[in-house]
Amino acid sequence: MTNEAQALSGAAVGVVAFAGERLEIRPLRFGQLLDILAVASPLIESLTALGNASADDLGFFFELVRKHRQEVPQVLALATGREAAFIESAELDEVLDLFAAVYGANRDFFDQRLRPAIDRLGARLRAGKPGAGSTPPSS
């Protein structure tokens, strides 16, 4: 089953052992994404800037944590439905596995679906510049 089909069916993309529990990792829902964007804009900019680094690269992870000490546990908490304190209480290797699972469960969506959708929206908006077509009369 593809990530898209799993998201539609509600099936778990993966399970991660974390702080003595098994957490199901699913693609983000729209509301989760909105909350994450509100918290993590600087973190997202770093993810974009680091581009080709892989999610399991320790240097990549430490750079994110160094720059975004508060945002990393908050983002993982929002993505999993758990409290940030729960995320912070785990062992480092568990946090790395959780980060990789959350990132991996959503990477295809951002790369293959969101980017093209934003490009299409941008093209429509550019095509709709003043004078580019008919507009309803103003009252």
Image (cartoon, rainbow, N blue to C red):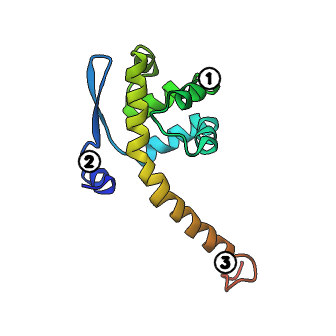
Horizontal placement of 138 versus 4: left or right? right
In the picture, the quarter occupied by the C terminus is: bottom right
Q: Position of residue 69 (x, y in %)?
A: 59, 22
Q: Residue at x 58, y 29 (%)?
A: 64
**Residue under numbered circle 2:** 10
**Residue under numbered circle 3:** 127
Which of labels 3 and 1 is toward the front?
Answer: 1
Above or below, 14 against 90 in this view is below
Identify the element where label 1 is drawn: helix
In the picture, the quarter occupied by the N terminus is: bottom left
**Quarter location, residue 45:** top right
Q: Residue at x 38, y 26 (%)?
A: 82
Within 10 angstroms of label 2, few (less than 14), some, or many (20 or more) residues?
few
The residue nearer to you, when weighing 102 against 62, is: 62
Q: Which mark is residue 66?
A: 1
Q: Residue at x 61, y 41 (%)?
A: 50
